[in-house]
Image (cartoon, grey):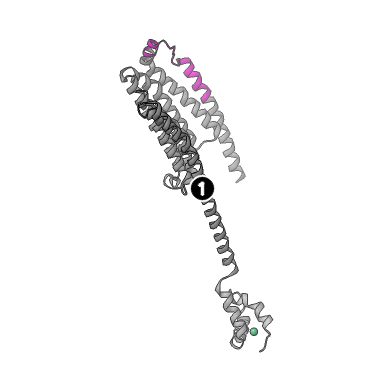
């Protein structure tokens, strides 16, 4: 053998990854043809590289740890569920013993379900913890309201349920929109989707309140007051999200739009004012001078923002 095994074993990694010169390659191949020991060393090397081994081991450790914690949290969830079942059982027995049938027991049950949805559900559910918890919480709150409405013979259920739905949408929609897999569907329109969800649930809430209080008096007043305000929220959103101006100009534009919409409010609310004054609540619409001064402030700020933008743009061009 021309070269000894130590030298060849040093060269083997380079040979295996094919990053050596033709001369080295030839020397190694000649040696391998004669030396079974070095041939075996090369075979071992090609089997799995050290990097692959480390990655595989790491994945195994992470997976077993995740499984361990999942089992632990499921166990904790079952224990808490057991503890929760104690007051449920006690109330069941007491209610059966004291009343003719089950009455307030269902209120207790639904109340405990609300707590359970926040504590037990996230511990027990393996995937999509957040969505499942939110859904369970919303469902159990609506159930609680429904049971109380039945028990007290209230006709207010739709009002309470739709308001709860609106409030929870305000709270949950941003989290839902930015989480997988929803964010993949929405792409760059997360804000638009959130605003739409708010508007739909708000309209539903107003509709339910209208049904409850009587559409004839409620609808014109609600429309006149709510519509310009909703329009203003959308105007703010559109200006901030979609226009390509600097922050100062956007602030100015928002103030202008609120000035304009307060004008719309004054026009629409003439009818509403009459209805509201019947109820004894004092309510006055924005006056023309107020509206004009709001717009004036907005134009001033937007103008300053526009000038800053022009100045900066000019400087950029100079630097080029
Ligand atoms: Zn050798």
**Magenta segment main secondary structure:** helix
Which percent across, then down, holds residue 159?
Answer: 38, 25
Is residue 16 positioned above or below 102 on the image?
Answer: below
The residue stretch that appears in magenta? 274-298
- Please indicate, yes or no, whether residue 234 appears anywhere in the rendered image: no
Give the position of the N terminus as an image quadrant.
Answer: bottom right
- Which residue is the site of mark 1? 75
Q: Is mark 1 within 8 Å of ligand 1?
A: no
How many numbered marks are there? 1
> Is 122 or 311 nearer to us in this picture?
122
- Please indicate, yes or no, whether residue 220 appears anywhere in the rendered image: yes
Which percent across, then down, holds residue 198?
Answer: 42, 33
Name of the residue lying farthest toward the left = 216
Picture quadrant of ligand 1: bottom right
Which percent across, then down, holds residue 24?
Answer: 63, 81
> Is 181 or 87 nearer to us in this picture?
87
Residue shown at the point (44%, 27%) measured from the top left: 232
The answer to if 287 sits in the magenta stretch is yes
Q: Quadrant of residue 209?
A: top left
Q: Quadrant of residue 246?
A: top right
Residue shown at the point (54%, 51%) measured from the top left: 69
Residue shown at the point (62%, 75%) measured from the top left: 14
> Is 193 or 214 nearer to us in this picture?
214
Residue shown at the point (47%, 22%) measured from the top left: 259
Is residue 130 positioned above or below 283 on the image?
Answer: below
Q: Secondary structure at mark 1?
A: helix
Q: Residues within 10 Å of mark 1 (few under 14, many from 20)?
A: some
Query: Position of 152 compared to 236: left or right?
Result: left
Name of the residue lying farthest toward the front = 97
Which percent across, then down, holds residue 242?
Answer: 46, 37
């Amino acid at each position: 053998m021309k070269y000894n095994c130590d030298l060849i074993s040093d060269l083997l990694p380079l040979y295996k990854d094919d990053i050596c010169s033709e001369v080295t390659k030839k020397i190694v191949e000649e040696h391998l043809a004669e030396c079974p020991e070095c041939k075996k060393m090369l075979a071992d090397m090609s089997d799995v590289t050290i990097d692959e081994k480390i990655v595989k081991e790491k994945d195994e450790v992470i997976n077993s740890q995740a499984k361990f914690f999942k089992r632990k949290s499921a166990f904790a969830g079952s224990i808490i569920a057991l503890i929760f079942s104690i007051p449920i059982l006690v109330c069941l027995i007491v209610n059966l013993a004291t009343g003719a049938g089950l009455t307030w027991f269902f209120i207790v049950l639904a109340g405990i379900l609300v707590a359970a949805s926040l504590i037990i559900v996230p511990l027990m559910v393996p995937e999509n913890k957040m969505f499942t918890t939110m859904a369970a919480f919303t469902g159990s709150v609506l159930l609680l309201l429904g049971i109380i409405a039945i028990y007290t013979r209230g006709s207010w259920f739709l009002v309470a349920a739709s308001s709860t739905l609106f409030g929870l949408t305000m709270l949950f929609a941003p989290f839902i929109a930015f989480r997988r897999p929803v964010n993949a569907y929405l792409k760059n329109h997360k804000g638009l989707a959130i605003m739409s969800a708010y508007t739909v649930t708000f309209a539903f809430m107003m509709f339910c309140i209208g049904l409850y209080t009587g559409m004839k008096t409620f609808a014109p007043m609600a429309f006149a007051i709510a519509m310009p305000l909703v329009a203003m929220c959308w105007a703010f959103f559109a200006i901030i999200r979609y226009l390509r101006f600097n922050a100062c100009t956007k602030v100015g534009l928002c103030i202008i739009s609120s000035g304009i919409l307060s004008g719309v409010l004054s026009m629409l609310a003439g009818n509403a004012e009459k209805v509201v004054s019947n109820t004894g609540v004092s309510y006055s619409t924005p006056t023309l001078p107020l509206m004009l001064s709001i717009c004036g402030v907005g134009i001033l700020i937007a103008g300053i923002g526009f000038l800053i933008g022009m100045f900066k743009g000019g400087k950029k061009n100079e630097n080029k």
